[in-house]
Image (tube, rainbow, N blue to C red):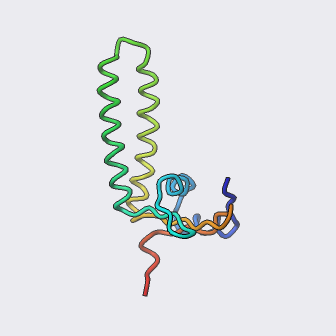
Amino acid sequence: MLKPTHHFEKRIAQRGISRAMVKWTIDHGEIKGDKFITTRKIIRSIVSKMNARITKLDRLKTKFKHFNVTRLIDKARNRLLVQKKIALKILAKGGVVVVVDNAALITAYDVDSYKKY
């Protein structure tokens, strides 16, 4: 379990990054050193896979509409839609970087905000 620092809490509040975005970035992001990074390319790839799974679940629901599994299919579909919504928010920001050291969340920022000179 990663423990957020006071600095981290202040920065995500300042930069409009939600805890859900941070969790999504840690779960799906690319690891580079001490950073978890989600770029537009990574997010687009994951969202397209989510869309395919949502379509597949819709087909399953119509196929098994007379059975009791439709509630389970709806739950899975709704979880995917929530994850997709978070991914699209991150995509709108241009991506998110979360910096971690040992078991502590240090800071988080938008991918576009850090410029290398």
Quadrant the C terminus occupies: bottom left
The residue under the point 32% across, 29% down is 58
The residue under the point 70% across, 67% down is 6
Question: Residue 64 appears at what percent x and percent y?
Answer: 34, 17
Q: How many marks?
A: 0
68 vs 14, nearest the viewer? 68
Locate residue 10 relative to residue 112 in the image: left or right. right
Question: Residue 98 appears at what percent x and percent y?
Answer: 55, 65
Relative to 80, say whether 106 is above or below. below
Relative to 93, say whether 86 is above or below. above
110 vs 36, nearest the viewer? 36
The image quadrant of residue 111 is: bottom left
The residue under the point 42% across, 47% down is 85
Residue extending farthest bottom: 117
88 vs 64, nearest the viewer? 64
The residue under the point 42% across, 52% down is 87
Relative to 22, say whether 114 is above or below. below
Relative to 64, say whether 108 is above or below. below
The image quadrant of residue 55 is: top left
Question: Residue 47 appears at what percent x and percent y?
Answer: 35, 49
